[in-house]
Image (tube, rainbow, N blue to C red):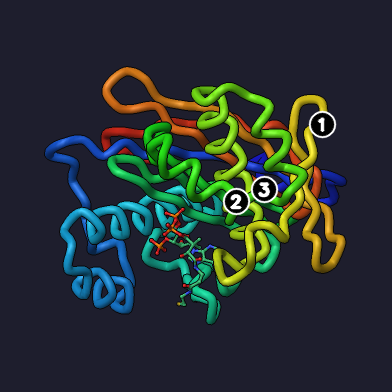
Amino acid sequence: MDFLRTGEDVAQVELHCLYLHDGFDLPDRLLSEAERHRASAFRSADARCLFVAGRILCRSIIANLLGCTPQALSLAITPSGRPYLRDYPDIDFNLSHTKDRVALAICRGGRIGIDIERIDAFSEEETREIMPMILSEQELNQVHRFDTRHRHDVFLACWVQKEAALKCLSQGFLADPQSVMLAPGNATFSGTWQLSGEPIFIRSGRIGGGESADFQWAVATSKAATTPLWRHHKNGIFY
Ligand SMILES: CC(C)(COP(=O)(O)OP(=O)(O)OC[C@H]1O[C@@H](n2cnc3c(N)ncnc32)[C@H](O)[C@@H]1OP(=O)(O)O)[C@@H](O)C(=O)NCCC(=O)NCCS
């Protein structure tokens, strides 16, 4: 159980991606009563499915790490909507879902946020409209140096990085995305939470192909972290 080793200077990160294909079994018996109640309130079947899949994924993977049953985990939610493990303050996790994918990031020794978006999440027109609301003036100038097609890709990469950072900070879009300043580094981006000067460590990339569309992803941690590797799941066996 290397992931749970203590005393490291860097945070340890695990990333999991669940692909929801037709006929995928979602056993909601793994959920708490409160989660089943929340699931039943979704009007959209797709949104319900993503929520249930996210809870099943995080309960199964984290329970396996901790050596307990998925049902035994006590998940609480902050007032801003962020789920967390009530009994394990040293282990943080975060979820993101879109279309037929659910992503889970787990971090020991720091806080974490994750975002995934389909690469066709925004049209070129939407990109043009949204960019000034998300990027600072300096970032906007940098993005405008790219031609239109690349500009879309660069903006999407910035979007997921900022959303991951805001989720790491528990704020989500309660905070202004312009308050996260992105700066390119060697292999990773680093960010700064402008309001407090707090550093944020960001990794980003693309996954997908095959049976599903490509996705842009980003994880943000409150501490420098080990290089995360993706583990992909599609048959409901999450260990
Ligand atoms: C966090 C936020 C950016 C996520 O947006 P989204 O389009 O649903 O994006 P994702 O699929 O990437 O993430 C959803 C997951 O983020 C997590 N999440 C929710 N709020 C969060 C927060 N404040 N910080 C970090 N993570 C959060 C949840 O696990 C959620 O999945 P779940 O509802 O199935 O548990 C957006 O919900 C937000 O800005 N929330 C904060 C403000 C708000 O509206 N709060 C409501 C009060 S309860």
At mark 1, the secondary structure is: loop
Foreground pick, 28 / 220: 220
- The 10 Å Cα crowd at callout 1, few under 14, some 14 to 19, many 20 or more, is few
Identity of the residue furthest to the left in this view: 23
Foreground pick, 145 / 30: 145
Q: Which residue is mark 1?
A: 185
Q: How much space separates mark 1 and mark 3, taking CA atoms?
A: 14 Å
Residue type at tag 1: Gly
Instruction: Please report the residue visible at 25 percent of the width from the left and 69 percent of the height from the top.
Output: 39
Q: Which residue is mark 2?
A: 132
Q: Which mark is residue 220?
A: 3
**x, y percent for residue 81:** 49, 73
Q: Which of marks 3 and 1 precedes in the sequence?
A: 1
**x, y percent for residue 170:** 62, 67
Quadrant location of the N terminus? Answer: top right
**x, y percent for residue 24:** 18, 41
Q: Which mark is residue 82?
A: none
Instruction: Please report the residue visible at 85 percent of the width from the left and 50 percent of the height from the top.
Output: 7
Q: Quadrant of residue 225?
A: top right
